[in-house]
Image: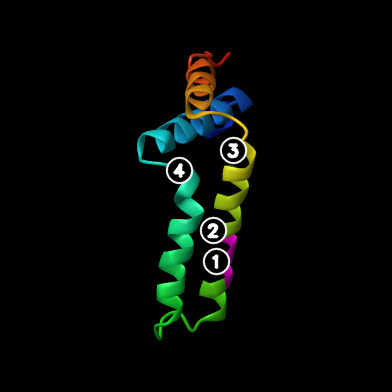
Amino acid sequence: MTRENQKTHRDVMRSVAIFISNLSFEGDFKNQPMYLQEIFELLLDTEFGNDRILRQKMLSCLQTSRDLVKVLSQFTDKQIQKACDNVTMVKAV
């Protein structure tokens, strides 16, 4: 069995929790969709931004970022951090 096949759903959830936890330490992650939108709007005014596939990728990134903020917006940063800490402490069986 390969190492990848030995991973469980707990490993996935632990990794996601660590990722979300790290987001809260990198500034206000709730503003990330606005930051991405600003960056993408500036990029779209360039020759490189005139690419349909790139535009689709940018819209997908914005939507994912907005969805994450929407899901987490009902919680305080402290609640999110506490939940992530609890998940990362779970040992994979």
Residue under numbered circle 2: 61
Name which of mark 2 and mark 3 comes first in the sequence. Answer: 2
Q: Earlier in the sequence, mark 4 or mark 2?
A: 4
Say which residue label 4 marks.
Answer: 29
Q: Residue 10 carries which label?
A: none
Residue closest to the eye, 58 or 72: 72
Tell me which amino acid carries mark 4: Phe
The residues bearing labels 1 and 4 have C-alpha atoms spaced at a distance of 20 Å
Q: What residue type is labelled 2?
A: Cys
According to the image, what is the colour scheme of the structure? rainbow
> At numbered mark 4, what does the secondary structure look like: helix, strand or loop?
helix
Q: Distance between the residues labelled 4 and 2?
A: 14 Å
Numbered disc 2: secondary structure: helix
CA gap between label 1 and label 3 equals 24 Å
Q: In which quarter of the image is the N terminus?
A: top right
The reply to whether the C-beta atoms of the residues labelled 1 and 4 are less than 8 Å apart is no
| Real-space Cα separation, disc 4 to disc 3, in angstroms | 10 Å
Indicate which disc residue 57 carries. 1
Magenta part of the chain: 56-61
